[in-house]
Amino acid sequence: MRQLLKDIRRSPLLWLLAFVPVVLVAQKLKPEAHTLLFVLSVLAIVPLAALLSLATESVAAKTGDAVGGLLNATLGNLTELVIAIAALRAGQYMLVKSSIAGAIVTNALFVLGASFLLGGLKYHVQEYNRATARLQAALLFLASIALLVPSAVAKAGDPAAAGFTGKLSAGVAVILLLCYGLGMLFSLKTHRELFVSAEPAEAGEQPWPMGLAVATLGVVTILVALVSEVFVESVQKAAESFGMTPAFVGFVVVALVGGAAEMGSAFSAARKNHLDLSVGVALGSASQIALFVAPVLVLLSYVIGPTPMDLQFWPGAVVMVIISTLTVSLLTSSGRSAWFVGVLVLAVYLIFAVTLYLLPPQSP
Amino acid sequence: MRQLLKDIRRSPLLWLLAFVPVVLVAQKLKPEAHTLLFVLSVLAIVPLAALLSLATESVAAKTGDAVGGLLNATLGNLTELVIAIAALRAGQYMLVKSSIAGAIVTNALFVLGASFLLGGLKYHVQEYNRATARLQAALLFLASIALLVPSAVAKAGDPAAAGFTGKLSAGVAVILLLCYGLGMLFSLKTHRELFVSAEPAEAGEQPWPMGLAVATLGVVTILVALVSEVFVESVQKAAESFGMTPAFVGFVVVALVGGAAEMGSAFSAARKNHLDLSVGVALGSASQIALFVAPVLVLLSYVIGPTPMDLQFWPGAVVMVIISTLTVSLLTSSGRSAWFVGVLVLAVYLIFAVTLYLLPPQSP
Amino acid sequence: MRQLLKDIRRSPLLWLLAFVPVVLVAQKLKPEAHTLLFVLSVLAIVPLAALLSLATESVAAKTGDAVGGLLNATLGNLTELVIAIAALRAGQYMLVKSSIAGAIVTNALFVLGASFLLGGLKYHVQEYNRATARLQAALLFLASIALLVPSAVAKAGDPAAAGFTGKLSAGVAVILLLCYGLGMLFSLKTHRELFVSAEPAEAGEQPWPMGLAVATLGVVTILVALVSEVFVESVQKAAESFGMTPAFVGFVVVALVGGAAEMGSAFSAARKNHLDLSVGVALGSASQIALFVAPVLVLLSYVIGPTPMDLQFWPGAVVMVIISTLTVSLLTSSGRSAWFVGVLVLAVYLIFAVTLYLLPPQSP
């Protein structure tokens, strides 16, 4: 417990934890203050995500490599998953799908681009392991393609074929989860040497005791779930008052909020010239959204959603995901980076964000 | 002749040749038993394709490198061509086009993916010649793109422009055939060292005598043509009774049946850690469909088809072909493979197959 | 001045300068002879573009590397810009957009493909700096993607959203210009060693005196502007009499005419086995169209056009630009070239040109 308090004292980010009780109280007192609740819930989720990530690493460090790696990989996108489940229960499928597509794009473009830029401002040219990066980029490309097949083909079919998309989405979800399982076997067991450890832990840092870590994991997950519900309830109305479209909220806001923890580790690795680690975090996170988070949400929607959710994304999201994963594949093929590459990648991300911001609300 | 019988005795696959007379007799006796005829004709085409491939290699081995290579390359996809011609004569253009697109996708995804998986289960990481694979992947990408331009642009045009697509398709076919001719010159004459020999022959195997090989080539081609006619007549009705869409039949069944011979050599090369050969067979075969089989069919349709056939594919097929060739290009850029890469490539192929299976029949 | 006359005497291309007065006089005497005026203006623009390129290099050589590079880069596509401005003033936005897309495609496919072919006919296999080419290809890909986002997403939106496309296009234009500025900083200052000098000047050639070079630059730009106006006025009617669609004129004719100067240097570098230079000129020129010429035209349209121009391209153009930049990215990943690669790249360009030639005129 003292360890937890010490970590909180040392890290200014964790001071934001004070917003967790604030948002929960505010929700009771002023359930109509959507804009306020939205801002408070964003401020509360960010430190919770960071805490979740710390706790996961501590558990992972204690349980040994294989189980630890599994935990790390599976819980790595827990925040995104919990937020999406809250949106799923509220039947806000548009928000769920936007946040899936947005998380892939944000990891592939924003996290990678900002890592290239931040690293490139410090180092003239940064080199990283080309072969590994290409393999990871190929995996991400294949995972995204698999995720998008229902959207790509259903455009071709006639609109009467709604049942087709539902069945196909469920089938794709099952195939994706099987691939995820085999991918775990691959990255944690048979070919672990190909994957850089995704631990952002400082060398000198002491992991938490097991009990504390597991307890933190449980409590924080519940807190994220509670705050996520406030977030999902308030986001639509708040977005309107900020002039944001629902697509923008899911694609940009939710993805940035949910991925705050990974971003921290990717950026700090880039500043230390460990671009391999940054690339690994960005691509690994994006692959996991496609292979794990998205299919779990589809299958969960049969249990907890008002109706089953399919994997039919709006065409703009399909285009953006494909462009992002293609970009990553083409970029990593050189194994070199400099600051201007980061600028251009961020420019594409910025143009996507501007597009979604300006998009007429009824559109997607 | 004894050589031929010996080869047949040694190879269990060739025992299936017994189905050739069976299907031809069954067609006379029970012309209405579509499902039975379909199954029998598939069982008969597979060994004929294998025999065709053996005979081609024997002729190629005798005639010396240049002519032999030419024969090997041109007759390598003879089975696909003969089946497609039977469908062309029957005016089943949907089936012809599906089988063209399907043959490219099957070679690029299924043959390559299964080679990676089969090789990867035996060897930890397999390396292959990156530069050659990239060149071949770039050629396949360009060939596919050229093939798809009429489909990609005609979507943009108004539907009134049917005459446009016909003229464009004929023009594209002529350009593709010219490229095919120049490609022969390139791979057999000026730059033959870049292309791994596509001969799957065992070192110790004795080629057939010339007369036998040529006779076999002629007789087997006629048999494939006869059986193909049964196949094409029965496939539509049989597909209905199996619940398969016409798109699925052309894309998956015809492509797998027609390419059975190449698959054998690609897979056995992968198991022997000759991934260069597997990649060469898969990419070379796919390129040949685009540069040779497809344009020949378009030009033949002016002579033997009820109306000229154009190169306008349905949008789902366009998407699948582009994804497949892009995937191959991105994958081969690393020059390394492991079993999980094969799993993901096969997963994308499986998702394509599931999509086509579920597709409402009136759709494409 | 003697230097200028000497250069003109030595270069047969510059003899075409005689057509400059001819076309201006012809325009006064026979303003209705559209076909004649079109042919004459094409013949006059080509040597003017070459002269512009010579003058720019001379100024660049005198002013030192940084300013010179800036001039060279910014004035490199001056011909394209001046022609497009003439079309912009005439409100021919279709022609402007076709020429933007066409210039990217022509540089990426035609200039690169012809360089590969011309070089490959002389050298068996040509190698070039893979890492640099990949970086440049990645920059081109990102720049093109950014340019095309409004087209890609507006298809998704409903047609009522015209205001959306206008605002988005202006925003994208500003972002592109910022990237262009940062790109200058990158290629001329912080990472100049990555970029091959784009000077096609013969080693023994003497640069012009400063005064002559600046005067030539000014006079020739005015002449290009005058001739461009004749060109733009005559092109539509002339195109009809040649049976060319407006899309073909913008995409192929304007792009080839405007880029004649760069082509010369790319091709002669390829013949000297300096494929790095050819790739640099082709990719650099294409990137510049996307990052500089296109956004400048959008912003200028607010000042000099009848109505603001947006960045919404017709779908066929989007497909062709994406295919071209993808092709370049995949091709350059091998770092090797041989003549057949050039043939296939040119075949794709030829198929694009045939498509546009056959396209029903009302289509795009």
Image (tube, coloured by chain):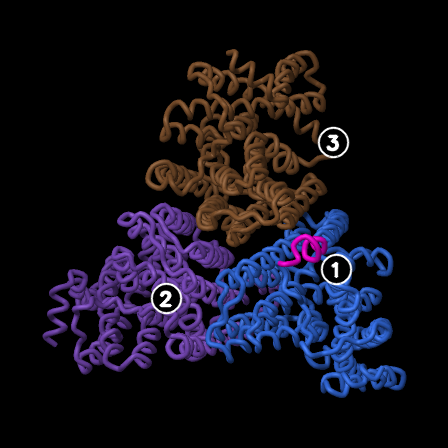
Chain colours: A brown, B purple, C blue
Q: Nearer the viewer, mark 3 or mark 1?
A: 1
The amino acid marked with disc number 1 is Ala
x and y percentages locating residue B278 in the rendered image: 32, 60
- The image's mark for residue A242 is 3
Residue that mark 2 sits on:
B285
**Mark 3 element type:** helix
Residues at marks 2 and 3 touching, judged by CB atoms closer than 8 Å: no
Q: Is residue C207 visible?
A: yes
> CA–CA distance between discs 3 and 1?
44 Å
Asked if badges 3 and 1 are on one and the same chain, I answer no
x and y percentages locating residue B352 in the rendered image: 42, 51
- Give the residue drawn at x 56%, y 14%: A5
In the image, B234: left or right of A2?
A: left
Query: Does C54 lie within the magenta span?
Result: no
In the image, C328: left or right of A363?
A: left
- Looking at the image, the residue that sits furthest to the right is C28
x and y percentages locating residue C353 in the rendered image: 61, 73
